[in-house]
Image: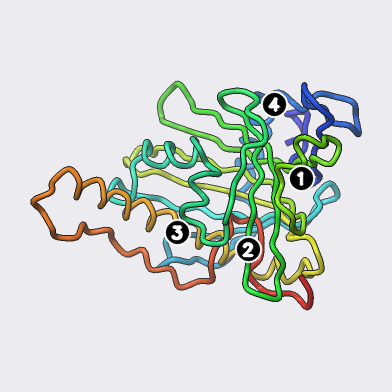
Amino acid sequence: MSESGIYLSITPLKISGLPLLCVKTSRQIPSEDEIIKAGKQLLETTPSWKQGKAYQHNTVKTFHRAKGPKDGTAWFGRVSEHTKEDATFDEFWSRLGENKAENEKEYIPEIKKVTLVKQISPTQSVWTLYYTFPPPVSPRVFTVVQTTWLSPDAPKTGIIVSIPVDLSDNAEYATKEEKGVKGRYVSVERLQELESGKVEWRMATSSTPGGKIPQFVADSSMASTISRDVAHFLEWLHANRAKTDASATPGDTAPAETGDTTAPEAPAAAATTTETPGPEA
């Protein structure tokens, strides 16, 4: 990660207008190339992380890395491989690499609202996401700058990096955030087409729910939480695929097969929060 010139962590970037500025260092937010490079370098280290449990009928494997000197919290990750029956690379990318926040709102039940704060470029934008949970957990607000990259060469590969952003120095942008406890997350996702024809979906995240939920409580459920994202995504994708098939063949009333998308673990929250209530929200 150090080779990229930036270090990915939950420490938020500060916005004081345009161009985007990192207030602490008076530098512009790293270029998209630097952000993507840092994301690639991080994911390349994940095979050496400590292996965790497997979820979703042993199809989603998890791993984690302890908090380092520059980390705000520990890192957690997952990896899964998918046949074309699950989703093709293009189906994954069109929903994760494009309009990511808006799509997450459709398949992650805790996300109630997403708002575009600023479109910086076709492949970089600032979004704020509003989550709600059963009492006594208070609503959470996560604001991130999302950067995407799609390889022009084979094999098909796409990267999505989300870095937390603090809007408090810009009154106009700050009004776009909902009221709630401020949480933070940094995440990197990679979609890659394998020689077998399958698609690998690999991700790593470090996060804090904020408020008074102890970090160890959040960490204890993170592996199952991020694994649930896979089931939620595929269930949503297959439901929409079935609707498309039904509209294309109005004479066919039989429901489309969607495969086994049963998700035995607790609800996912975009790998950013914990569903476990703390003593106070």
Which mark is nearer the camera, 3 or 2? 2
Which mark is nearer the camera, 1 or 3? 3
Spatial CA span between label 1 and label 2:
24 Å
Q: Earlier in the sequence, mark 3 or mark 2?
A: 2
278 vs 70: above or below: below
What is the three-letter code of the residue carrying label 1? Answer: Ser
Which mark is nearer the camera, 1 or 2? 2
Spatial CA span between label 4 and label 1:
14 Å
Q: Earlier in the sequence, mark 4 or mark 2?
A: 4
Which residue is found at the position 68% from the left and 31% from the top?
A: 35
Which residue is found at the position 19% from the left and 50% from the top?
A: 246
Give the total of numbered labels.
Answer: 4
Spatial CA span between label 1 and label 3:
26 Å
Q: Secondary structure at mark 1?
A: loop
231 vs 105: above or below: below
In the current view of this chain or complex, which residue is farthest to the left? Answer: 251
- According to the picture, the residue beneath numbered tag 4 turns out to be 34
Tag of residue 9: 1
- According to the picture, the residue beneath numbered tag 2 turns out to be 132
Q: Residues within 10 Å of mark 3 (few under 14, many from 20)?
A: many
User: Is residue 8 left or right of 151 when viewed as pictured?
Assistant: right
The answer to whether marks 4 and 1 mark residues whose Cβ atoms lie closer than 8 Å is no
What is the three-letter code of the residue carrying label 3? Answer: His
Which residue is found at the position 53% from the left and 67% from the top?
A: 267
Q: Residues within 10 Å of mark 1 (few under 14, many from 20)?
A: many
Of 74 and 93, which appears nearest the observer? 93
The answer to whether marks 4 and 2 mark residues whose Cβ atoms lie closer than 8 Å is no
User: Is residue 259 left or right of 89 when viewed as pictured?
Assistant: left
- According to the picture, the residue beneath numbered tag 3 turns out to be 232
Q: Earlier in the sequence, mark 1 or mark 2?
A: 1
